[in-house]
């Protein structure tokens, strides 16, 4: 019985650790997208405005924002799968060792997905606005 409990405990810890890893990945990719987008916008502002550069920056922002949103959604799904598996092992532990694990509950994820998706969506919208602005001022 002790070996089974040890296996369940290690499986629980492994899935919980994987879940935390996905949350960290999601956070780091959003930080990278924001830093790179800010740097590109600063270069655009410092440089001489021209249609070609503006179009490249807009395309970059749209692609990076879309990638970030896709990656955030994918890692959130993986995080939830890992959290559900960890919860299942925690429930099995509670059944295997009465009066020990019943009160343990998994805490909610510290970073819900919606704000992260909104950040990436704003990067995409910014790219679209730059593209529209550049196209409207091309002939002037």
Image: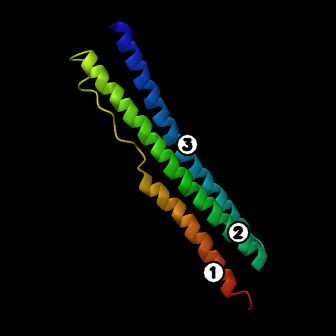
Q: Say few, some or many: other residues with alpha carbon within 10 Å of mark 2 (under 14 / 14 to 19 / 20 or more).
A: many
Q: Position of residue 92 (x, y in %)?
A: 30, 23
Q: Residue at x 32, y 8 (%)?
A: 1
Q: Say few, some or many: other residues with alpha carbon within 10 Å of mark 3 (under 14 / 14 to 19 / 20 or more).
A: some
Residue carrying label 3: 25
Q: What distance separates the C-alpha of mark 1 from that of mark 3?
A: 32 Å
Whether label 3 touches label 2, CB < 8 Å? no
> Which numbered circle lies on residue 132?
1
> In the rendered view, does 7 fall on the left or right side of 70?
left
Can you say which quadrant of the picture contains the C terminus? Answer: bottom right
Q: Secondary structure at mark 3?
A: helix
Q: Secondary structure at mark 1?
A: helix
Q: What residue occupies the far top of the structure in this picture? A: 2
Q: Position of residue 8 (x, y in %)?
A: 38, 19
Q: What distance separates the C-alpha of mark 3 from that of mark 2?
A: 25 Å
**Is residue 50 visible to us here?**
no
Q: Position of residue 106 (x, y in %)?
A: 33, 33
Residue carrying label 2: 57
**Is residue 118 visible to us here?**
yes
């Amino acid at each position: 019985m002790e070996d089974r409990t040890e296996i369940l405990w290690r499986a629980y810890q492994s899935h919980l650790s994987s879940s935390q890893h996905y949350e960290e990945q999601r956070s780091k990719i959003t930080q990278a997208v924001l830093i790179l987008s800010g740097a590109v916008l600063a270069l655009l502002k410092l440089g001489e405005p021209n249609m070609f550069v503006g179009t490249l920056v807009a395309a970059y922002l749209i692609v990076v924002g879309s990638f970030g949103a896709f990656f955030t959604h994918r890692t959130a799904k993986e995080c939830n799968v890992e959290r559900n598996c960890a919860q299942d092992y925690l429930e099995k532990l509670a059944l295997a060792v009465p009066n020990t694990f019943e009160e343990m509950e998994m805490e909610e994820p510290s970073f819900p997905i919606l704000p992260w998706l909104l950040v990436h969506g704003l990067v995409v919208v910014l790219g679209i606005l730059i593209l529209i602005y550049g196209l409207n001022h091309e002939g002037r």
